[in-house]
Image (spheres, rainbow, N blue to C red):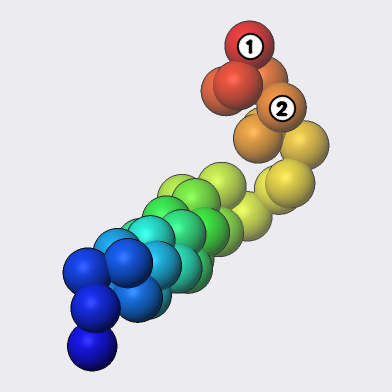
Amino acid sequence: MSDKHLTFYVSLWCKDRVEKEVNVHLPKKKSIPELRN
């Protein structure tokens, strides 16, 4: 597997992981836009 593929899968995994963490800590989706500002 090339580095590009590895980086791609790692980024996908991290994104999925982060979304799950956010969903755990912030059950309400309304809180997400506030964090981005």
Task: Name which residue lies at 22% across and 69% down.
Answer: 3
- Number of other residues with Cα within 10 Å of mark 1, as a class: few under 14, some 14 to 19, many 20 or more: few
Residue 34: horizontal and vertical position, in percent? 67, 20
Residue 9's tag is none
Report the residue marked by disc 1: 37
As rendered, which of 11 and 19 lies closer to the eye? 11
Residue at mark 2: 33
15 relative position to 7: left or right = right
Using the rendered image of the protein, determine whether residue 1 is visible from the camera's viewpoint.
Answer: yes
Q: Residue at x 65, y 35 (%)?
A: 32
Label 1 sits on a secondary structure element that is loop
Residue 19 locus on image (x, y percent): 52, 59
* Front residue of 3 and 27: 3
Identify residue type, mark 1.
Answer: Asn
Asked whether, in this view, residue 11 is left or right of residue 19, the answer is: left
Q: Is residue 33 left or right of residue 21?
A: right
Q: Amino acid at mark 2?
A: Pro
The image shows a total of numbered marks equal to: 2
Instruction: For residue 21, say whether it is visible.
Output: no
- Height in image: 7 above or below 34? below
* 37 relative to 33, above or below: above
Image coordinates for residue 37, horizontal then vertical, percent:
63, 11
Distance between the alpha carbons at the discs numbered 2 and 1:
7 Å
Residue at (71% x, 27% y) in the render: 33
Secondary structure state at the residue bearing disc 2: helix
- Farthest-out residue, bottom: 1
| Dot 2 and dot 1 residues touching (CB under 8 Å) | yes
Residue sitting farthest toward the right: 30
Q: Residue 22: where, in percent of width, then height?
A: 49, 51
* In the depicted structure, whether residue 13 falls above or below residue 31: below
Can you tell which quarter of the image residue 7 is in?
Answer: bottom left
The quadrant the N terminus occupies is bottom left
